[in-house]
Amino acid sequence: MTQDEPPIPLTVLMRTFNEADRIEAAIRSALPLRAEILVIDSGSTDATVAIARSLGARVVTNPWGGFGPQRRFGEALCTHDHVFSMDADEVLTPELVWEIRGIFLFGPPPALMKLRKAMALPHHDRPPPFAFCTEQIYIYDRRVARTTENPNWDHLDIRTAEKPRRLEAVAWHFTYRDWNHAVAKANYVAELAARTSEPRSRLELGLRVFVEFPFYFLRFYFLRRLFLAGADGFAMATILAFGRFLRIAKMREQAASRAVDPAAQAAADEAR
């Protein structure tokens, strides 16, 4: 792909904070799209902003207000109505770039497009063979789909009955820098989920605390095919299952606190 290729009416929207070690690979993989690249940075103290600008991205700084508000802020600044929400730890494969460009160059693009992502394990330069892919709407027309103001999660408020188009090619998701990052992120996500989930009964949580880890380990290891990644796949399945267990343990802890402290219950309701 060269600069002679026509641009497409698409804005690649990235939210960043201290991604200097990963953002160059992400932006370089997106450059062949010939789309606008807009980075919303929440105050990085490393070279994230300088790297992004050196590669031609437009960078706007905005204080972090949560996942939803930050992406919604960026949506309003996009030059084009079609938005591609891409993380700074992702790499677009050439096949995916070719597929997206083809959609925009040959006919009006659909309002919603589902993108598949395959996770690369720490210290690996690509996902394992036959990797399981998550699937979600990441390319959308902001005139009919906008991110909600939920600070904890990315949710689209979709105002069209049009069915999303599923892209065949995949993106590579380098979710974790190393095993320490994987463990820290599992703890962070578990804490976030525990603080924002609807209250559950202590009986339900007490039962789930025994089965959550083995159930999710088997799910990640076999159904999500991490067994194909050898020892590292086993380690990743263990960490992911531990994160699910930790979520239930933290929810149970909060349920116990609310039972003895009405103020804690009020604070939990306010957080949601």
Image (tube, helix red, strand yellow):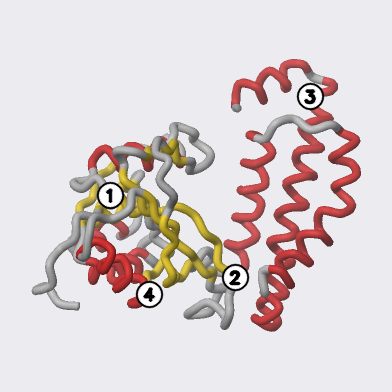
Which amino acid type is shown beneath numbered disc 2?
A: Phe
First-in-chain label (2 vs 4): 4
Residue of label 2: 132
Residue of label 1: 82
Which amino acid type is shown beneath numbered disc 3?
A: Arg
Which amino acid type is shown beneath numbered disc 1?
A: His
First-in-chain label (4 vs 3): 4
Residue of label 4: 93
Query: Measured from the top left, where is residue 190 in percent x and y?
Result: 67, 47
First-in-chain label (1 vs 4): 1
| Label 4: element kind | loop
Disc 3: CA contacts within 10 A as few (<14), some (14-19) or many (>=20): some
Front residue of 195 and 17? 195
Against 70, residue 47 (above or below) is below
Question: What whole-number distance in Å separates the C-alpha atoms at marks 3 and 1?
Answer: 44 Å
Q: Name the residue: 70% across, 31% down.
A: 198
Q: Name the residue: 81% across, 53% down.
A: 212
